[in-house]
Amino acid sequence: MNARKLEEVEVDTRDIRKFLDVHDEARVTEIQGRAEKLRALVGGHTIWNVNSTAVGGGVAEMLQPMLAFSRGLGLDARWLVISGPPEFFQLTKRIHHALHGQNGDGSTLGAAERDIYEATLRENADDLISRVKPGDFVILHDPQTAGLAPLLMDAGLHVIWRCHIGYDLRNTESDLGWNFLRPYVEHVPALIFSKRRYAPTWCDPDRVVKIQPSIDAFSAKNQDLDPHSALAILVQADLVAGEPPDEGTARFRYIDGSEGRVERQAVVDRAGDPPPQDAPLVVQVSRWDPLKDMMGVMMGFVKMIERSPEIGAHLVLAGPNVHAVADDPEAPQVYQEVLAKWKELPDAVRERVHLANLPVDDVTENAIIVNALQRHAAIVVQKSFKEGFGLTVTEAMWKGRAVVASAVGGIIEQIEDGVDGCLLEDPADLDSFADILERLLKDDELRENIGTAAREKVRVQFLGIRHLTDYANLIEQLLARSLAD
């Protein structure tokens, strides 16, 4: 018997009527009716989702609520996480960069790498096939899982591949990445992208589906927090100055309604004290990934405060603990590069820049810290060079923040410049970035108006009911096509 390679992630069951907090009765009733129809179509079959990590990153954060609400609608939805050696995840990170048109660590994507990729996924496929039954649905997420597709299709499963990353243009690197993946996904019945332009040219357009991501409005990361609670959480996490809160504060709600309290602190590199409670914060929360350009955010902020030191703003660059995310081997190196540059800053500037590794031992605690940090921020930044969609942008917009983000990828489809956010046309233009920060920090009314418009856009376009409806439509179409064939 094969050793188990896959970890099954525990998934909650959640009542879709929770959406009555943000939608009207008609919208909720509509999705209940769609679910009833879908249950009849899929019969007793399971809908499996497979990705590469249970924590860290937008995919893992989306899967838990999407599957929990699916289960609440009576569907058998489950989640599996693949395993592999470090060289497998180093390789898939290389592919990730290639699909963004970047060369990453510059390593090759040749026969030896294909052998590593296929051998790892063959072991995972053996385990997966032992758990499923013909006619089940399997939604594979991102390059790490693409190689499973042919093996699962041969086993009689309905296979969907969901690519959460992409690049609007084509270059040698993106072609290299897509050529590596092509043998595994070219014949998959449905290929999901956040933008249709992300699909490579060899994809059958009839198999390409556009489904934009969503956020969970009720999760620890996005649930409502009053300013006092947010501040207590940040003080407890050592991200803002203040006396340690008492036992009755720094608290939050788990999805099941029970209460928790933030206990752990971030590991912060700083020169002096945490930011004062009344200091305007500029915040970027993301992985320590070169494409997120934490370095550029820091150096653009430095330009801004050198011009206008009277603003008194502080910058917090926050990401998950660099040693805690298994499928992101570049994180420690990126963090060390940012840290080295930070150490070169003049003392007066360095005191206003805080590099935070957020605790990830408790996923919910990590999420509530991020929530508090975004809500306390005057401005939330996402200055990525490439971005498939940009869920951190959606999250900050939902919290009514003024967001400054690069005009790349899916971010362009979220923000209308000057209305519900601010777009930086060239992510490498640090002078323009500094100009936008300065303008927003000096105009409280502008920030408030942008934040109000941002929250409403997310409510209408980027919450879970719309996302669930998109998947229901796709599965119905696949079943109809299968019957027609």
Image: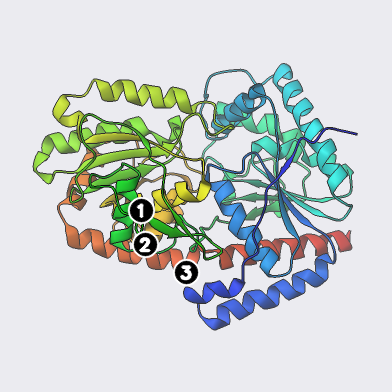
Residue found at the far bottom of this picture: 26
Residue, disc 1: 372
Residue drawn at x 83%, y 32% as measured from the top left: 3
CA separation in Å, label 2 and label 3: 21 Å
Give the quarter of the image for residue 339: top left
- Residue 95: percent from left, percent from top: 61, 30
N-terminal of the two: label 1 or label 2?
A: 2
- Residue 141: percent from left, percent from top: 66, 44
Q: Quadrant of the N terminus?
A: top right
The answer to whether residue 421 is visible is: no
Residue found at the far front of this picture: 247
Q: Are marks 1 and 2 in contact (CB under 8 Å)?
A: yes
Residue, disc 2: 225
Amino acid carrying label 1: it is: Ala
- Badge 1: few (under 14), some or many (20 or more) residues near its Cα, within 10 Å? many
The local secondary structure at tag 3 comes to: helix
Please tell me the numbered disc located at residue 206. none
Residue 4's place in the image compared with 376, above or below, is: above
The local secondary structure at tag 1 comes to: helix
Residue drawn at x 85%, y 59% as measured from the top left: 482
Amino acid carrying label 3: it is: Val
What's the image's color scheme? Answer: rainbow
Q: Are marks 1 and 3 in contact (CB under 8 Å)?
A: no
The local secondary structure at tag 2 comes to: loop
Residue drawn at x 16%, y 37% as measured from the top left: 305
CA separation in Å, label 1 and label 2: 7 Å
N-terminal of the two: label 1 or label 3?
A: 1
Amino acid carrying label 2: it is: Leu
- Residue 214: percent from left, percent from top: 53, 58
Circle 1 or circle 3, nearest the eye: 1
Residue, disc 3: 460
